Image (cartoon, helix red, strand yellow):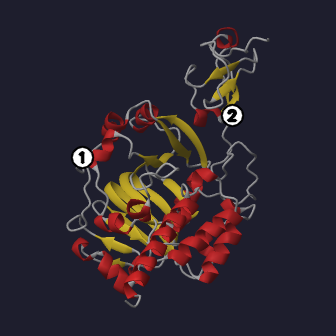
Amino acid sequence: MAATPLYCVCRQPYDVSRFMIECDICKDWFHGSCVQVEEHHAVDIDVYHCPNCDVLHGPSLMKKRKNWHRHDYTEADDGTKPVQAGTSVFVQQLQDRTFPSADEILVHMQGIHVTQRYLERRGFRYPIAVPKLDGLGLKLPPSDFTVQDVERYVGGDKIIDVIDVARQADSKIKLKDFVKYYYSPQRPKVLNVISLEFSDTKMSELVVVPEIAQKMSWVENYWPDDSFFPKPFVQKYCLMGVKDSYTDFHIDFGGTSVWYHVLWGEKIFYLIKPTQENLALYEEWSSSPNQSEVFFGDKVERCYKCVVRQGTTLLIPTGWIHAVLTSQDCMAFGGNFLHNLNISMQLRCYEMERRLKTPDLFKFPYFEAICWYVAKNLQENLKGEMTLWSPG
C-alpha cells in the first residue's frame, strides 16, 4: 500500500478544506496558514517562492497593477473595457451619481408600532425604517462594541468568509486575521464580512432579534425539535465592512425578509421594487455573462437610494432587489426570516434561484423542509377546525 503523500512545512496530507499554494520553484504545496499567505492575497502573487526557496531565489514576485476598473487589475488597460462592480473606479462613480430618494417608498415607523397585527392588516410590501431601538424588542451590544470584541466573543480561530470587494471574490480566513487587517494602518484591499452567523457562539447572548422577526419567523414557529435536518441559523449575522465595501444587487436567499441595524458607521442601500418586470429583468441580468459590467439600477425605471445611519433599523420585505455600499467603516447586525405574509413571492424567489443554479452555500438552508413543516402545521390546524365545525 502506497504511503500518503505529505506536503508543506508541517508534513501533513493534502486537506481539501484548507487553502494551499504551490511553490513555483520546488513545486511542493503549502498550507497558506503555515507560510503566512492568505487566500485573498495569493491571487496577487505572480511567482510564489516558499520559505525554503526564497532563501536562494529571493521573495515572491507580485503581479503588477495596470488598472483599477477591472476585477483582474493586471490585464491590459486599453481604455475600452467597461468598469466592473466593486472596483475603486466603480465605487467613486457610484458615489458621484444621484438617485431618487428612498423616502418615496420607505415607511417610517416607531418600533412600538411594528407589530405582527399591523403587518397582517397593512401588508409588508415596502421597506420600514425605524430610527431608534425603542419598542422593537431588539437587543444589541453598545455602540462602542468593536471588531476586537467580536473576536473575543466569537473566537479568533473561527474561519469566516470575506469578500475581496475589488474582485468581488470570496475567500476564507481566520477571524483574527481579519481583525489584524481591520486595524492595519495600511489596508492593501477592501475586505467585507457579510455572512458571519454567530448563533452558535458566546456573542449570541448579546443579541436578541426584533420581536417582529421572532413572532413571524417560520423557523422559530414551525421547525420541530425532532427534525431530521439541523435547524437553520439565519437570524443573527454580524456584518463588518470597511469604507468602500460594496455588495452588488441581489435578493436575499429564499426570498427571506431581512432586518438590518447599523451599530456604528453608515451603509447606503440601493433599493428596487420586486415588480414582475423588475424580477424578470433581474433574472436576465443575473444570468448574463457581463453582469459585473452592467449596473442593474440602470435597467429599471426607479432605483432608490436609502442612507442608513448609526442607530437605525431597516426592515426589507420579500423580493426587494438591493445593493449595499459601506460609505464609512461600519458594524451592523442583521437576520433573515421566512413568514406567512409573502409566501407566493418567497416561492418565486426560490424557483428563480433554482433556474439560476445558485450554489447551496447561497441558498436558504433546507428551504423545502421548512415549507413542508409549515404546510403540515396548516393541515393539522384545518383538520382541527373541521372537527370543531362538524355536526354533533
Circle nearer the viewer, 2 or 1: 1
- Residue at (54%, 46%) from the top-left corner? 163
- Residue at (28%, 55%) from the top-left corner? 208
Q: Residue furthest bottom?
A: 391
Quarter of the view holding residue 26: top right
Q: Is residue 110 above or below residue 184?
A: below
**Where's residue 85, x and y in %?**
61, 58
List the residue tagged with mark 1.
144
Using a 10 Å C-alpha cutoff, classify the residue at mark 2 as few (fewer than 14 neighbours), some (14 to 19) or many (20 or more): few
Q: Residue furthest right?
A: 1
Residue type, label 2? Lys
Quadrant of image for the N terminus: top right
Side (left or right) of 311 relative to 361: left
Q: Is residue 284 above or below residue 40?
A: below
- Residue at (38%, 33%) from the top-left corner? 155
Residue type, label 1? Asp
Side (left or right) of 217 relative to 12: left
**Where's residue 217, x and y in %?**
40, 65
Q: Is residue 171 above or below residue 388?
A: above
Using a 10 Å C-alpha cutoff, classify the residue at mark 1 as few (fewer than 14 neighbours), some (14 to 19) or many (20 or more): few
Residue 322 is marked as: none
Q: Residue furthest front?
A: 392
- Return the residue nearer the eye: 377 or 127: 377
Q: Residue furthest left?
A: 134
**Where's residue 35, x and y in %?**
58, 20
- Return the residue nearer the eye: 223 or 319: 223
List the residue tagged with mark 2.
63
**Where's residue 360, x and y in %?**
62, 52
Under tag 1, what secondary structure?
loop
Under tag 2, what secondary structure?
loop
